[in-house]
Amino acid sequence: MTRVLVLNGPNLGRLGTREPDIYGSETLEDLRTQLEQDAPDGVTVDLRQTDDEGTLIGWLHEAVDTSMPVILNPAAFTHYSYALRDAVSIVTEAGLPLIEVHLSNPHAREEFRHTSVVTGVATGVIAGLGFDSYRLALSAVLRRAPAGS
Ligand code: DQA
């Protein structure tokens, strides 16, 4: 059984009503349903969201301690959280895949969104494809997950 952690940072709990022109009108629960449908037999999707940086970092530590591959939308933390970057680095240094995802294409938006302090220590990044960013990340992460994770 492989468990994939799908972690979502601040304000992503408001998907569906938050700037639908940018993020779409589907909710995080809709995303959970889609990923569960995509997940092959033997794969569990563990989707979580928090507005709290410390909680997100704790979940990344949990990924290391239990060898879980990670899909991470760090939301606004992407652009400035060195603490989150360091936690991501612990995950990838442990040999676990971590794909950074974004619903929108931050490079096509305001200048402060053009910087990601996470990308440099992530396994890869997929952005601008809405829920497809996560769906593509799921297949990528599974192809890279260590056996038995
Ligand atoms: C986001 C992009 C970030 O710039 C923003 O702060 C978010 C969502 C995205 O998924 O497009 O909250 O990560």
Image (cartoon, helix red, strand yellow):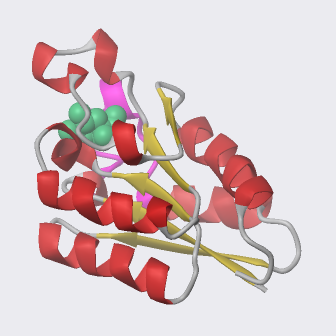
Q: Which quarter shows the C terminus?
A: bottom right
Q: Can residue 123 be seen here?
A: yes
Q: Which residues are magenta?
A: 14-28
Left or right: 50 in relation to 72: left
Q: Nearer the viewer, residue 109 or 32?
A: 109
User: Seen in the image, is 142 located left or right of residue 20?
Assistant: right
Q: Which quadrant does ligand 1 occupy?
A: top left
Overall secondary structure of the magenta section? loop
Where 101 sits versus 65, above or below? above
Q: Position of residue 123 (x, y in %)?
A: 53, 46
The quadrant in which residue 59 appears is bottom left
Q: Quadrant of residue 105?
A: top left
Residue 52 position in % (x across, y down): 14, 70
Is-magenta flag for residue 39? no
Looking at the image, can residue 18 be seen? no
Report the label total: 0
Above/below status of 29 relative to 82: below
Identify the residue shown where x is 19% and y is 25%. Answer: 113
- Residue 90, given in percent of the width and then of the height, sits at 37, 67
Specify the farthest residue to the front. 93
Q: Residue at x 35, y 80 (%)?
A: 61
Residue at 71% over, 65% down: 145
Q: Residue shown at 46%/88% (left/top)? A: 65
Give 115 or 32, whichever is nearer the viewer.
Answer: 115
Q: Which sits in the foreground, 96 or 142?
A: 96
Locate residue 133 relative to residue 93 in the image: left or right: right
Outermost residue to the right: 41
Query: Magenta includes 15?
Result: yes
The answer to which image quadrant residue 21 occupies is top left
Residue 76 vertical placement versus 146 (above, below) = above
**Image quadrant for the N terminus?**
bottom right
Q: Position of residue 34 (x, y in %)?
A: 66, 56
